[in-house]
Image (tube, grey):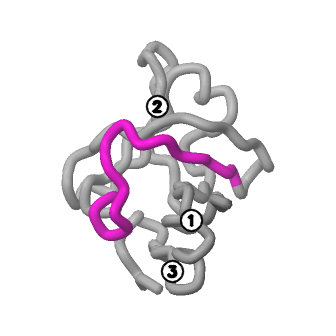
Amino acid sequence: MRRTMLKAKIQKLVVTETNLDYEGSLTLDESLMKAVGMIPFEQIHVYNISNGERFLTYLIKGAKNSGVVGVNGAAVHKAKVGHKLIVASYVSLDEGETDYFMPKILLVDDNNKIKEIK
C-alpha cells in the first residue's frame, strides 16, 4: 500500500505580487524552495490563510533571496498582495517508508525570509 504524505510546507508566506495575464503557477523565491527541497514545476497545494481559498498549481523559480511570492493566472482571483499563504507539497510513500519519513517545515517572517526550519 502507498500513502500520500506531506513532503514539505512553507508557513505564512506573504504574497508580494500578482499577474493575471501570466499563464499560471506560483512564483517562489529560489532560496525558500531549496530550503524545503521543492523544485520548479513541482505540483503544490496553496492554502490562503487570509481568506480560506485553496488551489492547486505548480512552482516557478523566483529570484534567489528576493522574498518573491507571486500568484499568477486565474489564481489571482484567490489571493491578493499582502495575503498570507501556506504552500505544501506531498509525496507518495510505500507503507514501510512512512515510519522514518519526516516532512520539512519552513517558517518565514513578514518579508518571506527564513525564520526557522523544523
Marks 2 and 3, how far apart at CA: 26 Å
* Residue at position x 47%, y 86% in the image: 118
Percent position (x, y) of residue 90?
55, 56
Q: Are marks 1 and 3 in contact (CB under 8 Å)?
A: no
Q: Residue at x 62, y 71 (%)?
A: 95
Going by the numbered disc 1, the residue's amino acid type is Asp
Residue 32 x %, y %: 33, 62
Q: Residue at x 68, y 34 (%)?
A: 78
Drawn side of residue 27 relative to residue 3, left or right: left
Q: Is 106 situated above or below 50?
A: below
Q: Amino acid at mark 2?
A: Ser
Structural crowding at the residue carrying mark 1, measured as other residues with C-alpha within 10 Å and reported as few (<14), some (14–19) or many (≥20):
few
- The verdict on residue 38 being magenta is yes
CB under 8 Å between callouts 2 and 3?
Answer: no
Which quarter of the figure has residue 36?
Answer: bottom left
Q: Is residue 114 left or right of residue 16?
A: left
The residue beneath circle 3 is 102
Mark 2 or mark 1, whichever is nearer to me: 1
- The residue mark sitting in front, 1 or 3, is 1
Q: Which stretch appears magenta? A: 33-48
- Residue that carries the numbered disc 2 in the rendered image: 25
Residue 47 colored in magenta in the image: yes
Residue beneath disc 1? 94
